[in-house]
Amino acid sequence: MSDDGKGPIESNGDIKMTILLTGASGMLGTAIGSALKRRGVRLLILVRREPKSPDELRWDPASGRLDEPERLEGLDDAVHLSGASVASQRWTESYKREMAESRVASTRFLSETLAALRQPPPVLVKASAVGFYGNRGDEILDEDSTAGRGYFPELCTAWEAAARPAVDAGIRVVHLRFGMVLGRDGGAMARLAPLFRLGLGGRLGNGRQWMSWISEEDAVAAALFAVDNPALSGPVNLAAPQPVTNADFTRELARAVHRPALLPAPAFALRLALGAMADEALLASTRAVPNRLTQAGFAFSHPTLPQALAAALAK
């Protein structure tokens, strides 16, 4: 494959590469799947429902079920993006368990399955998050920084550790520590843009917390870059090179939609409404930078927030 995430795939004659994909129905999974198909790749998609096409296989990591596991023999690559949404609902104890199971159990089951194959894929690229670092104030965080404290850092640590069977089997494993992905058709922008267009947006808490973000286009290209690049393994921050404070993000989004941002959300109100998610996902300060991506030669299409917002808000 080319290293820009967009070029034609290399293959031998008429033989297509086959890549395993989980989480294909999410915003990123949809975008990455589409990008792979444009490159001529054959996708084998793991789904939890009844398959609707020959390219789908049913699995249930919680029970250890995988239909037709022999079809995973000889995969060229695997991309694992499954995980319950972090921002879809309040973090009750039961939902925390669901978030953990959907990430940790699925990663462990997939890693053990791939490791047991006679012909395992050479690489497993899997989702993680900059939430690994936790609330760190103004500290600049690269891939060598330690894990933070709290539920989300502990979840990310367990999520990454669950891939150990694949690592032990000699599979190159890349943990994509995603920042907030700014996309057109889902994620944070699907919730924020309508509010800001109505003039109902504002900073969260005091607005001084750092936000690590990345455009959807760059997130997809960086994920495929990680698949292609044998020099990358272990954690890789998928965040733009210029993190911003929440106050700056709010200001730029308001400017992009030509509306004022006059309605800040106080920290106490966020905690009342959202519980633990407020402190660990909205008020936490995470200033992550993409050292490993830039050192490997990845070029961002949207290195600044105004560029990324313009792309996310484009019709």
Image (spheres, helix red, strand yellow):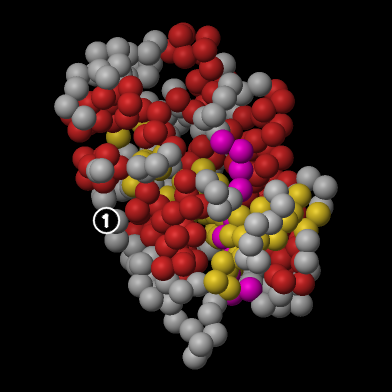
The picture places residue 283, in percent across and down from the top left corner, at 44, 23
Q: Would you say residue 80 sits in the magenta stretch? A: yes
Looking at the picture, does residue 237 appear above or below residue 72? above
Residue 115, position in %: x, y? 74, 67
Q: Which amino acid does label 1 sit on?
A: Ser
- Residue at 35%, 72% in the rendered image: 7
The answer to whether any part of residue 289 appears in the image is: no
State the residue in front, 40 or 106: 40
Is the residue 237 above or below the residue 229 in the image?
above
Answer with left or right where residue 259 lies relative to residue 288. left
Boundaries of the magenta span: 75-85
The residue at the point 70 percent across, 70 percent down is 72
Residue at the (53%, 63%) spot, across then down: 233
Classify mark 1: residues with Cα within 10 Å, few (<14), some (14-19) or many (20+). Answer: few
Tell me the quadrant of the picture where the C terminus can be found: top left
Q: State the image quarter where residue 6 is shown.
A: bottom left
Tell me which secondary structure the magenta stretch mostly adopts.
Answer: loop
Residue at the spot of label 1: 301
| Whether residue 175 is visible | yes
Q: Does the magenta stretch include residue 283?
A: no
Which quadrant of the rendered structure holds the N terminus?
A: bottom left
Does residue 233 appear to the left or right of 140 in the view shown? right
